[in-house]
Amino acid sequence: MDLEAVNDHDHIKILLKHSTFTSTLINRERAREVTKSAYESLSLIPFIKTILQVVAASRNFRVVFDFNRDSSQLIDPIVDRGNFYLSTTITACVKELLDPYVRHRGLGILAHELCHYAMVLTYDSYARPYYQHSSQVILNFDRILAICKNNSDKEELIKEVFDCVRNFQHAELIARVPQLIVVYNDQPDKLNECRENFKQLFDMFELKTAAEMERSLTMIENYTSKEMMKRNKLIQISTLFGVCAMIGLVVVLYLFKA
Ligand SMILES: [Zn+2]
């Protein structure tokens, strides 16, 4: 493939070009250095590089690096607002990138946020790791979710998934895999233990999701921003239509009762 975003280093240049910074702790130049180094570190990790390439291929995005807040103050649109990146802005709270002792956590949260957007681009299914209407895959992922829930005491990052409302759990669960791969990148024993504890989830991400992301790269790079916005607009309109229909139904039921 000779696509720009999947060339070995060009995806980092594209990601940097689309990155902005919020910080009262460091200046712009330092923020840019830290950001570049974060992208370079992530790019060295198998599977994570694919996520970076998918996001870069879209060219229709902005990553906001918030160096004032750490991952515990994460504003994750999937969790907090459920807007599924319709604005194409990815916000990552990455204060931890400034501290070498916890940098791995900052890298993990960055991989997590970029993964959400890569899922939106690959599947167009509200950041979930499958195409809409793939009922067999959805059932299978539901089964994986239940197994992970049973084992969730073994890993805090998996346990947190079940604090989300049910609707967002599929999107949240898949984004935890790249996060865990990054957080435990320097602790291979811990990563292997995690891989064993959540085998079905890791297998799905590494064997299926990552392969489907790679296959979608050409299509994503050929999408124009205009088409992307049009598609996002359609999702917004159908969501609005759904909400209006629900309100209408409640009003009719109320009137009927009265
Ligand atoms: Zn999330």
Image (spheres, rainbow, N blue to C red):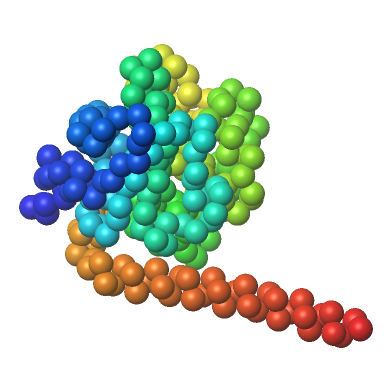
User: Relative to residue 169, is residue 124 drawn left or right?
Assistant: left
Relative to residue 64, is residue 73 depicted above or below? Answer: above
User: Relative to residue 216, is residue 10 drawn left or right?
Assistant: left
Asked which quadrant contains residue 123, the reply is bottom left
Closer to the camera, 205 or 186?
186
Relative to residue 236, is residue 9 depicted above or below? Answer: above
Which residue is painted at 55% across and 74% down in the image?
240
Quadrant (top left/top right/bottom left/bottom right) for the C terminus: bottom right
Residue 86 seen in the figure: yes
Residue 123 seen in the figure: no
Asked which quadrant contains residue 247, the reply is bottom right
Which residue is painted at 38% across and 39% down in the image?
66
Relative to residue 89, is residue 154 depicted above or below? Answer: above
Which residue is painted at 28% across and 72% down in the image?
227
Q: Position of residue 64 (x, y in %)?
A: 34, 45
Which residue is painted at 61% across and 44% down in the image?
164
Q: Position of residue 67 (x, y in %)?
A: 37, 34
